[in-house]
Amino acid sequence: MDIQIKRGLLDVCVLAAIKNEDSYGYQIIKDIKPYIEISESTLYPILRRLENADMLTVKSVEHNGRLRKYYRITQNGLDRLKNFADEWKEIMAIYNFVTRENDENE
């Protein structure tokens, strides 16, 4: 898969993972793993990028004597998810066109 496409997909997957409730890194990885493979070394730069883009906020909470960062989606993050859903309709139309052409040529 093209790295830029995968990067965009990972961003929206992370936003979708925290859409309904605040979450932390390890839990986000667990929530996403059934759909797409993601590692800690991939996740944390995404979280920083999304925070810098004002798509999520971070709050540190003590858990078992350690600080754990919890991530919360912002309105900008919710807007990005909505835009992604709209964009995906166009991507699916392109996919249908491309695969239709392939089916006709076979």
Image: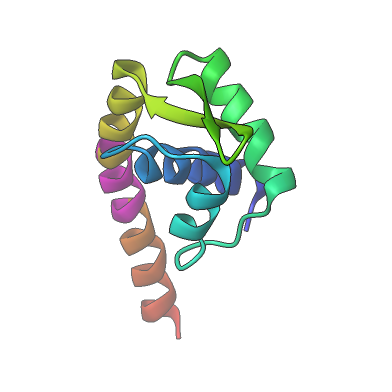
User: Residue 5 at what x, y percent from top left?
Assistant: 56, 45
Give the residue drawn at x 32%, y 34%: 81
Look at the picture and state if 30 lies above or below 63.
below
User: Residue 86 at what x, y percent from top left?
Assistant: 25, 37
User: Residue 84 at what x, y percent from top left?
Assistant: 34, 37
**77 within the magenta span:** no
Rendered image coloring scheme: rainbow
Relative placement, left or right, of 3 versus 33 is right
Q: Residue furthest bottom?
A: 106
Q: Which of 30/94 is in front? A: 30
Per the picture, the main secondary structure of the magenta-coloured stretch is helix
Q: Which of 59/36 is in front? A: 59
Write the start and end of the magenta stretch as one range: 86-93
Give the residue drawn at x 64%, y 51%: 2
Look at the picture and state if 2 lies above or below 73.
below
Q: Which of 37/7 is in front? A: 37
Relative placement, left or right, of 105 versus 92 is right
Which picture quadrant has residue 62?
Answer: top right
Q: Quadrant of the N terminus?
A: bottom right
Q: Residue furthest front?
A: 65
Give the residue drawn at x 32%, y 45%: 88
